[in-house]
Image (spheres, rainbow, N blue to C red):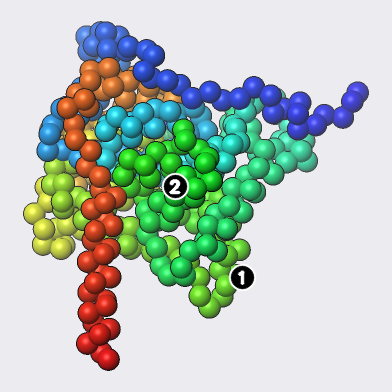
Amino acid sequence: MAKLTQKDFLKGTIKHIDMKKYNVVPMVEAFENMAYSSRDLARASKIYHQMLSDKNCSIILCIAGSLISAGLKKIIVDMIQNKMVDAIVSNGANIVDQDFFEALGYKHYLGTPHNADDNLLRDLHIDRIYDTYINEDELKVCDETVHKICNSLEPRPYSSREFIWEMGKWLEKNKKGKDSVVYNAYKYGVPVFVPAFSDCSAGFGFVAHQTENPTAHVTIDSAKDFLELTKIKIKAKETGLMMFSGGVPKNFAQDTVVAAEILGADAPMHKYAVQITVADERDGALSGSTLKEASSWGKVSTALEQMVYGECTTLIPLIIGYGYHKGAWKKRKAANYVKFLQDEDKKVAALKAKQNKAKK
Ligand SMILES: NC(=O)c1ccc[n+]([C@@H]2O[C@H](COP(=O)([O-])OP(=O)(O)OC[C@H]3O[C@@H](n4cnc5c(N)ncnc54)[C@H](O)[C@@H]3O)[C@@H](O)[C@H]2O)c1
């Protein structure tokens, strides 16, 4: 038998679902009169529609798991382009290994979880995410591109939001990734935060960059990320959280209420909150902790919250699709929190310049 090669495995590609094509409104509304998960999903969809209809509410999207590689990229891009989200908090895997990776021109491939020979995949440089394959040689180009972007920047601490903005700028300059989250967030002024930024392909680029430049290099300041997101919370006042999966992004966004309180600001609990997850609450961990539980910590208001238990690839097109087809986003204004944060940075730079002048 002929020896198998990468080409034998990397054939059919993952295609990103286009929620605009499917009007799910009648089905989601029919779910309201059913039971269990269907009714939970209908309520979650209505809460998202309420967030979009509320002129005073800023929407923070939280993403964990591997959702971009699974075909959900276009939904997130459509949310950005149609003012259905004002800030994003994600894990690094979605933003760098999956979205930026595809922006460089690479694809995710249809694989199989059941009879995959993972040793053979290893030999062929193919990585597997459940039923999805990735060409590991291409992923290395993604690490290397982050490395190059690091080398091109002034050595100093950056929030992940600032660094991801630079990644968007790089895509624009290199005419790549017009359909990516990173590029569209850059273009539409939606800040993207990745609080654990080194825990993905970007980490390899950073390790190489800092090794080559031991005394002066780019670093990621995750405390600045938290301060920036807290500033958004304080400016927005009313906020809604749309949480896909759970993980670090869920807690990071929820905690801005507590941080704002520490700063003495008048910032209410998150008014709306929806989480879609397979995690349950029995282990006491963050991902499965209910939104009612979060209210005991003063983070989420209990009136308009909904957990939906299930896997994201099937539920997100229904919940976000409902919000899209109901159309409340047409009346929303773009918050452009990137501009707001850049103006805040300018104020800090002016203060620094004044202090330096005074020292001389
Ligand atoms: N394949 C990968 O997920 C991958 C790849 C590279 C790096 N990483 C890094 O690993 C770290 C941890 O990953 P994480 O933040 O995704 O946390 P995680 O894997 O713990 O997931 C968070 C929670 O979301 C739930 N969840 C995940 N996918 C879901 C889905 N499709 N539907 C419903 N629920 C879902 C999980 O069950 C879990 O409870 C991150 O820093 C990330 O960048 C992950």
Which residue: 41% across, 67% down?
A: 157
Residue 248 lies, in percent from the top left, at 38, 48
Frontmost residue, 244 versus 287:
244
Evaluate if marks 1 and 2 touch, with contact meaning CB atoms under 8 Å apart: no
Name the amino acid type tagged 1.
Glu
Which residue: 67% across, 38% down?
A: 135
Frontmost residue, 360 versus 220:
360
Is residue 107 visible in the rendered image? The answer is: yes
Residue 16 in the figure: left or right of residue 283 = right
Is residue 297 visible in the rendered image? The answer is: no
- The quarter of the picture where the C terminus appears is bottom left
Q: Residues within 10 Å of mark 1 (few under 14, many from 20)?
A: few
Residue 110 in the figure: left or right of residue 308 = right
Task: List the residue tagged with mark 1.
Answer: 212
**Residue 168, label in figure:** 2
Q: Is residue 49 above or below residue 123?
A: above
- The quarter of the picture where the N terminus appears is top right
